[in-house]
Image (cartoon, rainbow, N blue to C red):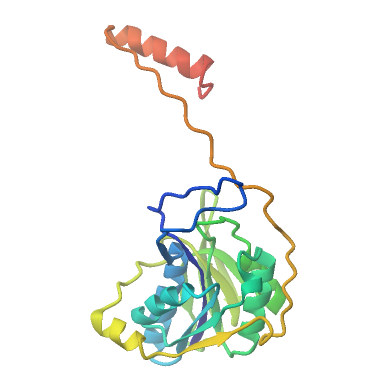
Amino acid sequence: MKSLVCLKQVPDTETQIKVKPDGTGIVTDGIKYVINPYDEFSVEEALRLKEKFKAGEVVILTVGPDRCTEAIRTALAMGADRGIHVNDESLNDADPYSIAQVLAAAASQEGYDLIFCGHRAIDDDFGEVGAMLAELLQLPQVTLVTKLEIADDTQSAVVERDVEGGKEVIEVPLPCVLTSQKGLNEPRYASLPGIMKAKKKKIDKKTAADLGITSERKLAPTEYTMPPERKAGKKYEDMEPAEAAKIVVEALRSEAKVI
């Protein structure tokens, strides 16, 4: 069972994000970067499949600048076998379609049974790359996956996914593209032996030209702004509970308009 895992490096959720004074982007100095959390579920699920079938390979596929090597090494320390790093200045801050094109071109040079993506990245929150990748490769796809069972003959899978108000169960032929959702598994921590082994595992470096890709941005931001600051809340003090409750309910109805 060979799995390709599309992985993105994103700012840590605990990082304080600041917008540049000219509004052209965010201040990157001092930012700590991590593996996109939804991609961690993908790495873990690919590793479990390899362990279950006692054969195969887990390949990490990343598009991004030099710093992304750290994220790939982390996935390799978890147990992945090797990495592919597409590092090209023309792809820095590329839009989802451009990234999907690159991933599709890289995947086409590999054999695979499954392609995993996180269902969205926590930085731009687009949630589009997995679907676009499946379309470009002409593969079936299932999004928001929370449970996966591969048939013994490895020709199909039964997938459970989140839908509004419940769950949906789908049978899908392989190969296919799956996007991982929270609840699929609990990602493992990298062990010390795994970290040491990861230093020797291979990471293939590629450029857009190596893949025959010419970056053509379809989507570009025009301005970055921080969300407006919240107004200070109101305090109701020194009154009887019944009176306070009446005033608060009225405020929620007439001012906040939430009831």
Q: Quick check: 194 above or below 121?
A: below
Task: Residue 201: name its quadrant.
Answer: bottom left
Task: Residue 135: name its quadrant.
Answer: bottom right
Q: How many marks?
A: 0
Outermost residue, left direction? 192
Q: Quick check: 243 above or below 41?
A: above
The percent position of residue 176, horizontal first and vertical second, equals: 60, 77
Q: Residue at x 57, y 64 (%)?
A: 143
Q: Horizontal placement of 38 versus 188: left or right?
A: right
Q: Residue at x 43, y 73 (%)?
A: 71
Q: Quick check: 199 above or below 92?
A: below
Q: Horizontal placement of 40 versus 161: left or right?
A: left
The percent position of residue 16, horizontal first and vertical second, equals: 42, 49
Tell me if I can see residue 78 in this picture. Answer: yes
Q: Nearer the viewer, residue 171 or 20?
A: 20
Q: Nearer the viewer, residue 223 or 106?
A: 223
The percent position of residue 224, horizontal first and vertical second, equals: 60, 47
Q: Quick check: 249 above or below 110?
A: above
Q: Nearer the viewer, residue 53 or 90?
A: 90
Q: Residue at x 51, y 24 (%)?
A: 258
Q: Residue at x 39, y 10 (%)?
A: 246
Task: Residue 202: name its quadrant.
Answer: bottom left
Tell me if I can see residue 138 in this picture. Answer: no
